[in-house]
Image (cartoon, coloured by chain):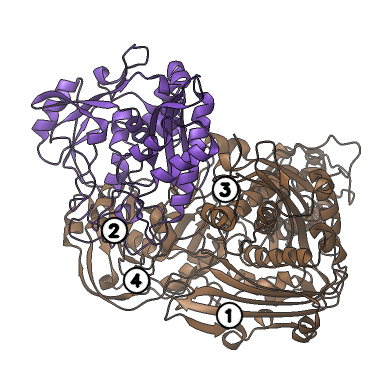
Amino acid sequence: MRPFAYTTAGTAVEAVAALAAAGPGARLLAGGTTLYDLMKLEIETPPAVVDVHRVADLAGFDTSGERELVFGAGARMADVAEDGRLRRDYPALTESLWRAASQQLRNMATLGGNLLQRTRCPYFRGGEPFACNKRRPGSGCAAQEGLDRSHALFGGSDDCIAVYPGDWATALVAFDAEVDVLGPGGARSLPLARLHREPGDTPQLEHTLEPGELITRIRVPVTPAGRGSAYLKIRDRESYAFALVSAAVALTVDGDGRVGECRIAVGGVATRPWRVPAAEQALRGQPVSDASARAAGEAAFAGARPGRHNAFKIELGTRTVADAVRVAAGRAVR
Amino acid sequence: MSSPHADVQPVDTRRVDAREKVTGAAVYATDLHPDQLAHAVLATATVGRGRITGLDTAAAEAVPGVLLVLTHLDHLDLQSPGFVMGGGYGVQSLQPLLDEHIAYRGQAVALVVAETLIAATQAAKLVRADYEPEPFAVTLDSPGVERLSQPAVIPLPFLADLDVGDAESAYAAAPVQIDAVYDQPAQHQNPMELIGATVWWRGDTVVVHEGTQNASAIRHGLARQLGIDPANVEVVSPYTGGGFGQKNSLQIHIAPLAVAARRLGRPVKLVVSRTQLFHHTSFRPASRHRIRLGADEHGRMLAALHDVEHQTSRFDLFPMMYTETTARLYGIGDFRGRQTFARMDTQSPGFMRAPFEHPGVFAFESAVDELAYAAQRDPLEFRLANDTTADPVTGEPFSSRHLAQCLRRGAKLFGWSARQWQPASMRADDGSLVGWGVAAGAYPASIVPSAAHLVASADGRIRVGVDGHEMGQGIRSAIALLVAENLGLDVRHVEITVGDTRVATQHLTAGSWGTASTLGAVHAALRELRKQLGADVSGPVDLAAAVGATGREHVESRAETLGPGQTEQDAERARQGLVALAGPEFTGYSTFSWIAHFVEVRVEPTTCRIRVPRVVSVADCGRVASPVTAASQVRGGIVWGIGACLREAGEVDPRYGGWLNASLEEYPVPVNADIGTLDVDFIGEPDLRFHPVGVKGLGEVSMVGVAAAVANAVYHATGVRHRRLPIRIEDVLAGTGLPEPRL
């Protein structure tokens, strides 16, 4: 780890000012569960860190609203995962939180920080000698001809196929979440779906925030499909592991047993949170059945581009989406 | 365990050092923080093999607080310690930092010492090396791997080819045959306590605190490396936070730390990081096993051929003994074993819990299961029908073999009789496929020279200084229980010093010989103490009164014991810090520990996730010296077996060398959520032919056969046989044309 300047902020406004004052390359620190890790590996070498983990106006969350759920970016994953209303009305959101990391990490990690969690690609985290365009632009991508079992089927480029690792954002993108940010130019909002970038030929750029901007809130529009939702996560062990494949499904079922509203996203298989409209379209208006669930899964993975060791994720993902549809439909209010 | 004295309260069998360990009061080697402590961090090579052509340490040296940067340019003047399995003391023979050659990625190129850990860490990253790369090979299938037949390059009797009868002819004639290849990856122990040491000089004496299984090898090996008298090396290791074979010899950082401590005149501490640990010390080598088995129509096994190759480094031959155990599992009259090295460009592999027995028995017991199915037999009945009382290799009897009893008792506890023979025939209520698997395991019993020193005091307490290392297995508890039971004492009145070269030689504790060796010496010293006290040969002793009656403050006794058939030559080897073991073949008998495992798996019908809701294991380890820690040992062994079968593999990218998934996040050991109910039972029959108090080994046999039982259960659940570990979700997904469930 390299020496760095450390400052704390008491409010979101102070944080933005501190970030501007700290100059280029400064990073925000919330739970520290990713940033400190990467700093110890010297994958991240910020000259300055602005600690926002005690910023009170980022900490709260409110799931009682009639139009939207509001989550402060500084709320802890563990606290939100235990919220009763969320557990009852948005099980996919709850499950995406408590199936992430470990209890100890969830006690530390924040919702806003989690959105920008960086990839677990071993060639990225491994440092030297591995080629990695994300870590060292222009050095190449060791994963393309390497051990790519955990890598992306969607959204990759010749320069990078690293998976976006988060669970929470995968669930949020299915619910059309919005993100509020505060920056030197003031406050703005953007759809979560536009927060992350695909790697293209600039894999070192992972999000669309402007320099000096801070995520302050995540807002989720209220929807009856929340009740009928599920987040399934398939991984190499039953806890403390990233998804090989995950699926967030939220739906309503109308009086004659057909799917009404329908939202589907997949994780562990794409370079950013990956909504799959084709799967939604395949399921919408269909009776809930094994066949329609399978068809949704197949539609979700129709355009997959596998590498050397990850083709199994197409069938695994198809089945995971189908399972999630079945679980979600079982929970849906009819 | 029965008490020999009916009038004495049952002794407290809880782990005697549990409170210290749970509260953090137990001081491990790198917990020490002596005055003037300096901190060391390693910088490591980034090429798979090659030569350092340039080294720039200026930036590292410029970091405030940096005291010293040691590289090969600093002429450390160290000798090789020699390989622990090649007549030396080291985890490998190659001592880094002595010349410009890089033998493997991750090899140390500099040791940076600073006032703080932060400065040392930062500076280590700033060490810059240029390399002239050379071609390298890192997997069994890589071009450039050199294959050598073991007996051709190490002509020692215990490493010879195994030929009992004429296995090839018997196999060729057998009406039922299995011929299959089983692949197992490299694995890494990852003990909770990282590898590390605190080292300082006291005058001409170097003091080493390191969590180890082999304080004696550190003493003698370091003396050899530094060119000093072993009397001037003091090694202290009261607790080791998990050894698992990785801490069984002199590590490669100790000598450079001693040099740094001497040059600085200060204590120096190094904790090897988790990622570096994957490259810094030993690991379980990848191995490939071809098993051929033949049986007759009645399910009697006639012939077995076990051909193994395993990886080793370019500079050491890590010897292998896979067939020693697989030849003993059943009464197979014709057996052939062949063992081959595959040399490649990694650090030297070494002993990892049940180093040969786990992979060898995974392969063999998988094949036995395949043969049982080919012969249309129940796999439990098939195993029982092939039991033996005599060692098929020597023809002599086993001193004890209760494997059939383990199998029968385990089957009863597990409910095996409700099993349906047909694969893929059992289903749970939730639609999961249910599989029940069984496998046997064995581990050779060995024993080493050992010394004990007892000091009984007038206050009724007794101090025990003895050969042995406490690495979590519970050797203190076993010693305390033996002494307390023998004399009728409260276990809290027994004080124990182990792992300390100031009280005993501290021969390597490994190979599941620790308890038998240590307890043998303590037992002999107790006998001597009773003589000194004028006490009867058995029965409780009022220690305070007996010592008081002598008019002295303390009464001492000493004993030095040897294994059966060992001589003064073995004792002398032990005193030189060398491995001096006897077994498993003794005059007139052979000795092994035995175990049977029964495993239930459930395979989720859609995504094919494998879960292991329950395991029943029944072990024959002779007398159970410490029931609480023994059961813990077995539970730990089961978890290791589940991890080995379903989770763990050191990932290798052949373009880069070294290990890719070098962290606990990426190297998936099982978590609590992966483990269901573990039921452990013991036969508990003392083996008095082998040992004066009837103890055999336990720590390693616990794991042997678990992976096979899991894989056999997966076969039973799905009808698909998996011969490559770990069995991952994609393997089951590909092999299983499972129908998806109904809503």
* Residue B367: image location, x then y, percent: 70, 67
User: Element under label 1?
Assistant: strand
Residue B275 placement, left or right of A186: right
Residue bearing mark 3: B608
Is B517 placed above or below A204 here? below
Residue B673 placement, left or right of B410: left
Kindly identify which chain the residue marked by label 3 belongs to: B
Kindly identify which chain the residue marked by label 1 belongs to: B
User: Element under label 3?
Assistant: loop
Locate the C terminus of chain B by quadrant.
Answer: top right
Q: Could you classify mark 1 by the number of other residues whose Cα lies within 10 Å: few (under 14), some (14-19), or many (20 or more)?
A: many
The residue mark sitting in front, 1 or 3, is 3
Q: Chain B takes which shade in the image?
A: brown
* Residue B485: image location, x then y, percent: 81, 44
Same chain under badges 2 and 4? The reply is: yes
Label at residue B112? 2
Q: Could you classify mark 3 by the number of other residues whose Cα lies within 10 Å: few (under 14), some (14-19), or many (20 or more)?
A: many
Residue type at numbered disc 1: Thr
Residue type at numbered disc 4: Gly
Is B506 placed above or below B465 here? below
Residue at 50 percent across and 28 percent down: it is A329
User: Element under label 4?
Assistant: loop
Residue type at numbered disc 2: Val
Say whether disc 2 or disc 1 marks the residue closer to the N-terminus: 2
Q: How far apart are marks 2 and 1 (CA)?
A: 39 Å
Residue bearing mark 4: B48
- Relative to the observer, which residue lies in front, B173 or B482? B173
Residue bearing mark 1: B340
Residue at 76 percent across and 84 percent down: it is B172
